[in-house]
Image (spheres, coloured by chain):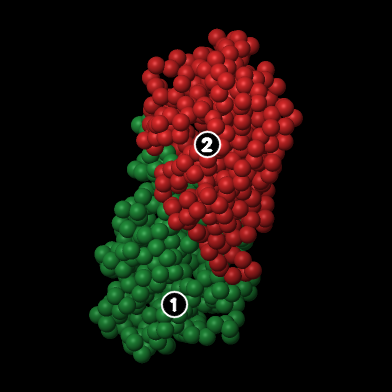
Chain colours: A red, B green
Amino acid sequence: MQEGGGTMEIREIRLEELDVERFITEEVEEISSVVADGVAISALSGGVDSSVVTMLAHRALGDRFKTYFIDNGLMRDGEPEHIVSLFKDLGVTVQLIHAERTFFDALRGRTDPEEKREAITRSFYRDVFGDLVRQAGAKYLLQGTNYTDVEETVAGIKRQHNILAQLGIDPEEMYGYRVLEPLVQLRKSAIREVAKVLHIPQEIWNRPPFPGPALAARVIGEVTPERVRIVRNATSIVEQELSHRGAFQYLAILHEDKVTGVRGGKRDYGLQIEVRCWESTDAKTGSPTRLPYDVLGRLAERITAETPGVVSVTYNITKKPPSTIEAL
Amino acid sequence: MQEGGGTMEIREIRLEELDVERFITEEVEEISSVVADGVAISALSGGVDSSVVTMLAHRALGDRFKTYFIDNGLMRDGEPEHIVSLFKDLGVTVQLIHAERTFFDALRGRTDPEEKREAITRSFYRDVFGDLVRQAGAKYLLQGTNYTDVEETVAGIKRQHNILAQLGIDPEEMYGYRVLEPLVQLRKSAIREVAKVLHIPQEIWNRPPFPGPALAARVIGEVTPERVRIVRNATSIVEQELSHRGAFQYLAILHEDKVTGVRGGKRDYGLQIEVRCWESTDAKTGSPTRLPYDVLGRLAERITAETPGVVSVTYNITKKPPSTIEAL
């Protein structure tokens, strides 16, 4: 395990050299020894990284570990309740925190992608998580940062790693806690192997990656409750239609641009949804899945019929690079 | 022939009842008799409608008919010169009018599609064509309005027919000319038959429709010389790759929304181009052409590689309705 801060000195543990049982034993012991008789907390997103971290800390600390699912209003349909229920089955009590208004207030009027991301990060750490840390009396925060996050931060592609430092926040000084990152030496493929041995269900370790800013990463322009409802609905349809195809990732993006449509025989401006579906092994490169046109047609038909205001649907046909998996 | 103004009383001449030779003879006679020893002019766009009108008026009036190609800066690559040269081969002298600055000045700062359209229409009639009418001493303006334009205007889908009336302009009072619309009883399929008999080359009567506002109809947001260059370049690529496939229409749209891309290994926001390719017989309904993925991939690769700033390309998968052929 490495504590947050340095990046350049982190050594990758490659999938082929990973001894999963030993890794789990060592990380559980390390968490026990570092936290000692203190309290640690984590924020569970339902992604494989935070799920594995949560299971490791639960094993190491039992009741002295608390985990929270923060509903920021930007989650997919039914996601918060579903994740809480999955972890209940694993013996872990997850507290569901309703913080939708805090996030939407912070997002109001913001259209710049960097500003939106920062509003979400600040709301999360400063307004919501800071309170939870104080209430729990926690001195340690477990985070699911992985090796790819570190690499992409170094390369300037992502800005996910070490978010607090990027915000100019020293977590120990500001909140009185230290950040622990048990997965920082592993890539996603290795983390999945750890997840399996920890009995985390397949739908978590085998599901497509979901971005930190959640559906806000899929709304171009201002993120309002109404616009999130639209992209949430389109996302449900995309996931229903594409989840069985084994693609690396599939998503719906709500555009800010309006385009002409016909409604009730009259010309009318409406919204456009962009669908992306990716073939990739490591997210570093990718190409659009060659979806049959019947599938594309059904997507367009359902999205326009079931999502009020949407008159147009596109499918992204660009490789990464020069595109990226997500739009923002 | 009908003179501009009324719409509801116009009777369609259907393709199967059209006697092309007789139609040409009658329209040529009617133009001769209405214009008598006056002067008439037309603005040639290179579309089949204005091309047929130009040939009819040329037959009827000879030197007393003048036709102009107005370069508004919004045309496709090489289009103005090419159209002038085609008509030279048909014995018709077309005057090429350079008015790019007038149009870009009128478009500056405008992002609303209706305002952009109106800026183009006003620049055309008030600033450029008004002068030409006065210089030519013309009393008659020949326009290529067809039956579908009339229908769609009545239905509220298009606002192309009777543009002057929509602007609250009485052309006779304001400019001293009357509008003649010889094609107002024909649909596109019938106009194509007339074009063939008039020896207009196939590339004109068989080419996909091109919108009145030209490439401005394919730029979401502000229309600047730089943004038109980008969509013009993407349009060239789309036409090169798709023109042999026999689709009804194929086009590139420059979006205003920016999306993430990777350039030189770094994350960077860039532009998105949307490609549409339509199967349709009458433009009233349509569906996306089922282009092979190799073709889609080549389009995305060429557009991102050859158009500076573009990092993402989508393909529209929506039917009309609820979509429309063009985006604005």
| Residue sitting farthest toward the bottom | B173
Mark 2 belongs to which subunit?
A
Q: Secondary structure at mark 2?
A: helix
Q: Is residue A88 left or right of residue A185?
A: right
Determine crowd level at label 1: few under 14, some 14-19, many 20+ residues with C-alpha closer than 10 A.
some
Image: B50 above or below B61: above
The amino acid at mark 1 is Ile
Q: Which mark is residue B200?
A: none
Answer left or right for A177 relative to A263.
left
Residue drawn at x 57%, y 49% as measured from the top left: A100
Q: Determine the image quadrant of residue A56.
A: top right
Q: Nearer the viewer, residue B106 or A67?
A: A67
Q: Which residue is mark 1?
A: B163
Do the residues marked 2 and 1 share a common chain?
Answer: no
Tag 1, which secondary structure? helix
Can the viewer see residue A98? yes
Chain letter belonging to callout 1: B
Mark 2 against mark 1, which lies toward the viewer?
2
Which label number is shown at residue A134? 2
- Residue, x 57% and y 31% (percent of image)? A42
Alpha-carbon span between mark 2 and mark 1: 67 Å
How many labels were placed on the picture? 2
The answer to whether B95 is drawn above or below residue A55 in the figure is below
- Amino acid carrying mark 2 in the image: Arg
